[in-house]
Image (cartoon, rainbow, N blue to C red):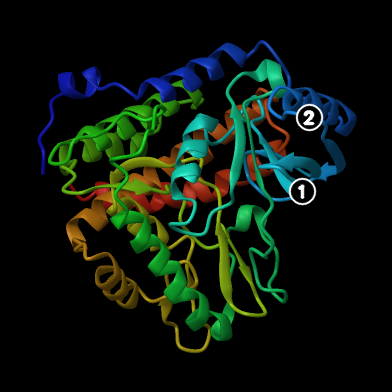
Amino acid sequence: MVMTTPSTRAAARVESTIDAVLRRKMQRRGAMIHEQPAIDAVSERLREFLSQRIDGEFLIEGIGRLAGGASKEQFVFDLGWVRNGQRRRDRMVLRMDPPGSMVETPRLREFEVLTMLDGVVPVPRVFWATEDPAELGAPSMICGYVPGSASAKAAVKTASGLGTVYGAALRPVLGPQFVRHLAELHRFDWTPHDLPSFERPRAGTTDAIDWRLAATDRAWQEDSFEAHPVIALTQRWLWERRPPVDHVSVIHGDYRNGNFLFDEDDGTITALLDWELTYLGDRHHDLAYAMMEGWGEHDPATGQFYCSALVTRDDMIAEYEKVSGLPVDSARLEYYTVLNMYWAAVALVGTGPRNAAERLTHLDSMQTFLGGLGAFYLDQLLAIVGKD
């Protein structure tokens, strides 16, 4: 455990690229109201954007809105173009930030990580990204379309994939892949790669957690409508107990059920999605997140809890340690469980309702509705941080 003082916490900073998007958020507040862009307008901007990046003629066809996601506006389209001397027709996805997002992060961070991880774990291939809203109307990323489903055909579809379940038949097929891909991500050596949108935390320090906590604290300060005693207790608990990172890994940040695609016919995970929360830090962050009560499922027949509706906690830890070669520490799991619930509470109780009230999102009803889940996490947080 690392002890901290009020001055230490006050002096904590956020990464420069995170600082930039948080500043941009505040500049938009009160200065604009979000209106969903018309398909024709998106198509025209996309055509101009690609004309600056593709040599020769190209054709955009079949552009339309794509469902899914709790914070991004997404469009699918077909691109006819010549790449590496070959004429191609690729189905692509345009991901755009609305003015107010529950996840305020730079698109370039997501782009850089997905570029690096192509061939390491199953991720969509990325082609272009921009932080300049003048180009596509908002910070955006264009990636390849990956076939697959986020849920079983017979499953009830849920908001943002929350509560996605797979059933007894798919669990033993998807569960081991889910754990293996996470282990491969965390053991991957990212250090030789160029990641200009990231600052590099030092192993053996609290750099990574300091930056993460400072960013979440700032989001709460800027977005919440009023103070909350559980948030104040949680902030103090987290700052006083932050553990140094022994091995710095690429962290997904939102690794759970509903955030990957799979082919139900052959049972293969085809893509890990939603990398907007990615950062460099402690592997226990992703592990604790995937194990959270809010994402999991209790088997109706046995009562057994399945993390992310896929795998038991013991099996997940055992398989993860076997594949990654990295140990799992129970004290760190508790710390990052609190950190994850803290972030979720800030996003669901603070940022989401603020975006809805300021009319900065196309998902104002859903972001308001999800405040109920935030209240659930506040109750769980109190059970832990209220003991001391």
Image point (42%, 47%), residue name = 253
Determine whether, in the image, residue 359 is placed left or right of residue 165: right
Q: Percent x, y for residue 207? A: 22, 32
User: Separation of disc 1 and disc 2 at Cα?
Assistant: 13 Å
Determine whether, in the image, residue 25 is placed left or right of residue 145: left
Q: Which corner quadrant holds the N terminus? A: top left
> Compared to 134, does 291 lie above or below?
below
Q: Secondary structure at mark 1?
A: strand
Q: Earlier in the sequence, mark 1 or mark 2?
A: 2
Residue for badge 1: 88
Q: Percent x, y for residue 323? A: 29, 70
For the residue pair 25 and 117, the one nearer the viewer reads as 117
Residue 383 appearing in the image: no
Residue type at mark 1 is: Arg
Residue 261 appearing in the image: yes
For the residue pair 221 and 154, the one nearer the viewer reads as 154
Q: Percent x, y for residue 193? A: 35, 38
> Compared to 388, does 137 lie above or below?
above
Q: Residues within 10 Å of mark 2 (few under 14, many from 20)?
A: few
Residue type at mark 2 is: Gly
